[in-house]
Image (cartoon, rainbow, N blue to C red):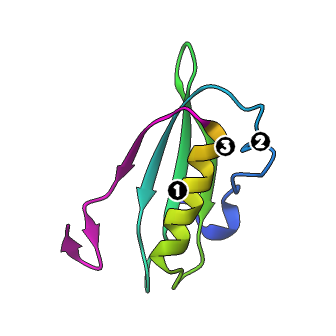
Amino acid sequence: MIEPSEARAISSRELGESVRGDFYAGVDLGKHVDHSVIALVRRDEDALRLVGLKIFPLETEYPGIIGYLKVMSERLHTIHRFLSTRRVLGRVF
């Protein structure tokens, strides 16, 4: 488990216009107890590499997280898939 203090945020440099590659994003939505997290993975020739991790503060509203994903998608251009957990607040959606 990665604690919020250990996470490396996805920097604006990494989301800059010159960044290219085959990216995938994983999203785990939390709220009151667990943090919402976005993991950004890049497919290289030999492996999938974690290139960024964003851990949001507790109580972050979901529209803010979706907005972050939108900006990330616009800047990277090649996020092939967004994957998410199926449970939010203990309910399957």
Q: Which of marks 1 and 2 is in front?
A: 2
- Picture layout, residue 34 above or below residue 68: below
User: Which kind of residue does numbered mark 1 sit on?
Assistant: Ile
Q: Quadrant of residue 22?
A: top right
Mark 1 in CB contact with mark 2 (< 8 angstroms):
no
Extreme-top residue of the structure: 45
Seen from the viewer's position, the closer of residues 25 and 76 is 76
Determine which of the numbered discs, if any, sits on residue 16 in the image: 2
Residue furthest out toward the right? 13
Quarter of the figure with the C terminus: bottom left
The residue sitting at the left extreme is 92
Q: Is residue 5 visible?
A: yes
Residue that carries the numbered disc 3 in the rendered image: 75
Which element type, helix, strand or loop, lies under badge 2? Answer: loop
Q: Residue at x 58, y 20 (%)?
A: 44
Between 63 and 59, the residue placed more toward the observer is 63
Is residue 88 found inside the magenta-colored segment of the image?
A: yes
1 or 3: tag closer to the N-terminus: 1
Instruction: Give amino acid for label 2.
Output: Gly
